[in-house]
Image: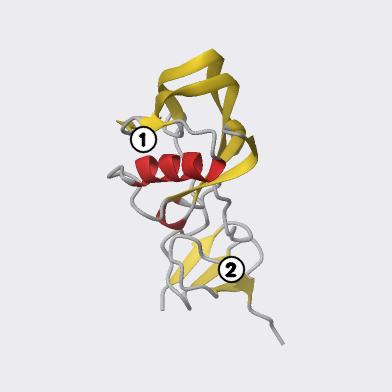
Amino acid sequence: MAIFYNPGVPSAGTDKIDTLTIGGTPTSGTFTLQIFGQFTTAITWSATNSTLLSNINTAIQALNSVGSTGIVVTALSLTAGIGTITVTYDDLLGVYAFPSGTGLQIGANNLVGTAPTLAIAETTPGVTATQRGANLGDMCVDTTNGDAYINSTGAANAPIWNLIPTT
């Protein structure tokens, strides 16, 4: 068990969430995305939402900087392949404040149709968890008031700090 010291109540952090918006009226084509300086392979657009999401997930998770569980892509408001898609950075990438410009970006837009567009917006900035990397059972002491907290989760990159009651 390790003991960490922090000026203030330790934070569990927040996962970064980006929103990818597909606009216009695409009918076919491909696009690429960039994350952490790496470009995905060409992602085939599909009017079938589940196919489009699968294509995006497969391309993102194939990146060395992401892996198979680092980012989750889900539909927020998607109709026939047009609308918004959420990209949540979780697992090893979660609860971390990413440097500016390292999140999701458009690589290439090779969509075909009537004025097809791609846009990215940061929906929720990541907030780094206090003592990210702490193990289950590790403690964190708030140096401003002496309260002690214990990490109650086994997820080292997303510690959940619970106040240890005093008598």
Q: Residue at x 27, y 45 (%)?
A: 64
Disc 1: which residue: 36
The disc, 2 or 1, on the residue closer to the chain's N-terminal end is 1
Residue extending farthest left: 64
- Name the foreground residue: 28 vs 73: 28
Q: Looking at the picture, does residue 143 appear above or below residue 40? A: below
Location of residue 84 by image quarter = top right
- Name the foreground residue: 84 vs 92: 84
Q: Looking at the picture, does residue 21 appear above or below residue 152? A: above
Give the residue type at disc 2: Trp
Location of residue 79 by image quarter = top right
Crowding around mark 2 (Cα neighbors within 10 Å: few <14, some 14 to 19, many 20+) is many
Residue extending farthest bottom: 167
Q: CA distance from mark 2 to mark 1?
A: 29 Å
Disc 2: which residue: 161
Q: Position of residue 152 (x, y in %)?
A: 55, 75
The reply to whether residue 126 is visible in this rendering is: no
Query: In this image, 97 relative to 84: left or right?
Result: left
Crowding around mark 1 (Cα neighbors within 10 Å: few <14, some 14 to 19, many 20+) is some
Q: Secondary structure at mark 1?
A: loop
For the residues bearing labels 2 and 1, Cβ distance under 8 angstroms: no
Q: Residue at x 46, y 24 (%)?
A: 28
Instruction: Name the image quarter holding the N terminus.
Output: bottom left
Residue extending farthest top: 115
Query: In this image, 33 relative to 149: left or right?
Result: left
Q: Looking at the picture, does residue 7 appear above or below residue 83? A: below
Q: Residue at x 54, y 33 (%)?
A: 47
